[in-house]
Amino acid sequence: MKLRWRGYPLVLREPLRISRSTMDRRDAVQVSLAHAGVTGHGEVVTSRFLGLDRTRIDTELTGLVDRIAGYPDPTALRADLPALATGFHLGVVAALDAAVHDLLGRLAGQPVHRLVGAPEPGAVPTAYTVGLVAPAAAGVAAGRLAAAGFGVLKVKAGDDHDVARVAAVRAAAPDARLLLDPNGGWTPEQAVRRLDALARYRVEMVEQPVPAGRVDRLAWVAARTPVPVVVDEDAATEADLPRLAGAVAGVNVKLAKCGGIRAATRIVAAAREHGLAVMLGCLVTSSLGIAPALHLAGYARWVDLDGHLLLADDPWTGLGGHDGTLHLTGTPGLGVTPRRRSPHVTPRRPEGAGCGDAGVAR
């Protein structure tokens, strides 16, 4: 088997501000696995919050080239991937996991959700993120999104305008389901006060209201509000779930945080055992990066897979979503195809036959 990769920039249509940062672009790396004349693809994106830059991505993929070359087929690689990638960043592991599932699906002539026995996703309404902007701007954005067909809006929170922002969104999109995400930007006391004040606006759930690392504080908030509390940063892997059982209503599963499709399906199963609802989330990424999670959407109560919709120019296509609804094509593998080759691909490293591209740390 042969591992290759290449990098390209992902530029947002407009800057996205949340409680801890503002982002207008990030770098992506397409990871490709070839076997028997067929190639599968996955994507990993840089993230300062997750401690992942281009240098680390390139270094880790370089360290896997020879190991992967020794595998006779993708079935064997899929079985060994968790052990093979021990110690590697889970974002890189998730990209390899996506690529091997895409490859296996293409070889078998099946879409990935059938390959792994997941429910047929069908038409999937996705949330669209309204950033931490002034209330008036949030209202304008919500009105535009509602007119386009979006029935689920996720409103960022974490400043003094939270109540006014949600009020403006609700006024502009009276029938939308509203999700709230402070990205850990509230204290427990602020969380209870804000959620009390927002009750009249029919907020359906709140994601990670307080900083990660203190499940007791999450439980304290959850016990004092009727709004379901869903954790994001506190629920990265399957090992995090037992301590969350009984404390919160649900967990946000992000494949880039847990290590890919196989890891996510284990988290879904564990969440059911612990009575936790499932939300599927994402990073800002292209359609290639969103596709693996969409194949698992049949498991989720809430779907927040809008990362590709935030881009000025998505280099992949096949998922739709600009009308608020995601659709798989039903074609083998992940079901996405390149829109066009990016003109900004980073030059190939001459010393790395079969390797990827040099990158700049961000």
Image (cartoon, rainbow, N blue to C red):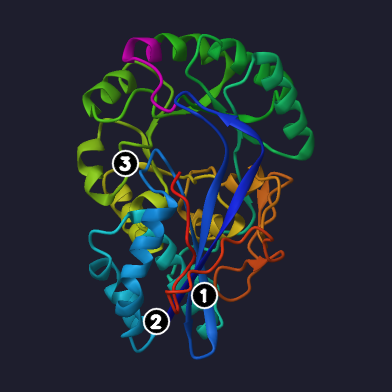
Horizontally, residue 267 falls left or right of residue 121, namely left
Identify which residue, 362 or 87, lies in the foreground: 362
Residue behind mark 2: 74
> Between residues 191 and 349, which one lies in front from this camera angle?
349
Residue 61 percent coordinates (x, y): 37, 66
As measured in the structure, the alpha-carbon distance from the residue carrying label 3 to the one carrying label 1 is 28 Å
Whether residue 275 sits left or right of residue 342 in the image: it is left
Picture disc at residue 235:
3
Question: Could you tell me the amino acid type at mark 1?
Answer: Gly
- Residue 255 visible somewhere in the drawing: no
Residue at the image position 45 percent from the left and 15 percent from the top: 195
**Magenta span contains residue 338:** no
Q: Are marks 2 and 3 in contact (CB under 8 Å)?
A: no
Tell how many labels: 3
Q: Which mark is residue 241?
A: none
Is 68 left, or right, of 182 in this rendering? left
Where residue 191 sits in the image (x, y, percent)?
A: 39, 15
Q: Quadrant of residue 310?
A: top right
Distance from disc 2 to disc 3, alpha carbons, whole Å, reads: 29 Å
Q: Residue 307, percent across and down?
A: 58, 46
When the figure is inspected, residue 43 is found, relative to residue 207, above or below; the finding is below
Q: Secondary structure at mark 1?
A: strand
Q: Which residue is mark 1?
A: 40
Q: Is residue 35 above or below residue 337?
A: below
Which amino acid type corresponds to the residue marked 2 in the rendered image? Answer: Pro
Tag 1 and tag 2, C-beta contact below 8 Å:
yes
Binning the other alpha carbons within 10 Å of mark 1 as few (below 14), some (14 to 19) or many (20 upward) gives many
Residue 253 vs 136, above or below: the answer is below
